[in-house]
Amino acid sequence: MTNAANRAVLRTLVIPVRGDQVLLGRKKQHRDGAFGVGKWNGFGGKLEPGETLEQAAIRECQEESGITPLHLEKVAELDFVDDYQIFGHVYLCRQWTGEPVETAEMLPAWFNKTDLPLTEMWDDDIFWLPAVLTGKRVKASFTFHHVDDSLGTGANPVAKVSIQVVSQFD
């Protein structure tokens, strides 16, 4: 893995889980344009000044889904090593307050763990999401094919993957 945390924008991602069900949100709009609109994803985003990763994860989940995580379990570190310059910290959430609601940014829906809308998600999700939903912790890095994506659809397919199962994070 590269030393991504020193060079990339940090992001958080929360995936609420209830038994065999996973709460995802379909991106309706993006603050910075069309990036990711129409894709299913967990809930998360950038850190605000002074926030910890966990504080940012909770705030973003509240803003995008209406639920407030009570406990976060870190399950993945994702390093996007090319143009995206993102280092993501992924958390599962099994306890929260509130009920999922549609927000200006996301439309939440429950999916069975074995029937995820992977073809409507980011291209890297197929490599790590099923693993973390079965109890694994992973560190992964992704390089993407460069495709003209001036519309911000995230249509750059994965070109190279490095993924390892870990017992803990540093």
Image (cartoon, rainbow, N blue to C red):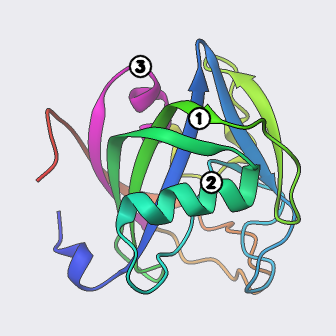
Query: With 81 as the anchor, is 165 left or right in this view?
Result: left
- The residue singled out by tag 3 in the image is 134
Rendering coords of residue 4 (x, y %): 25, 74
Q: Residue at x 41, y 19 (%)?
A: 134
What residue lies at 15% left-to-right and 39% top-to-bottom?
168
Instruction: Write down the quadrant of residue 156 in the picture.
Output: bottom right
Pointer 3 or 2: first along the chain: 2
| Stretch in magenta | 127-143
Which secondary structure, mark 3?
Answer: loop
**Image position of 90 with respect to 88: above or below:** above
In three-dimensional space, the C-alpha distance between marks 1 and 3, rounded to whole angstroms, equals: 20 Å
| Residue nearest the viewer, comparing 82 with 137 | 137
Local packing at callout 3 (Cα closer than 10 Å; few below 14, some 14-19, many 20+) is few
Q: Residues within 10 Å of mark 2 (few under 14, many from 20)?
A: many
In the image, is 78 to the left or to the right of 83? left
Picture layout, residue 93 above or below residue 66: above
Cβ atoms at labels 3 and 2 below 8 Å apart: no
Looking at the image, tell me whether mark 1 or mark 3 is earlier in sequence order: 1
The residue that label 2 is drawn on is 61
Q: Earlier in the sequence, mark 2 or mark 1?
A: 2
Which residue is disc 1 drawn over? 96
Count neighbours of disc 1 (C-alpha within 10 A) and say few if under 14, some if 14 to 19, many if 20 or more.
some
Give the amino acid at mark 2.
Answer: Cys
132 displayed left or right of 63: left
Q: Residue at x 76, y 81 (%)?
A: 31
Nearest to the eye among marks 1 and 3: give it: 1
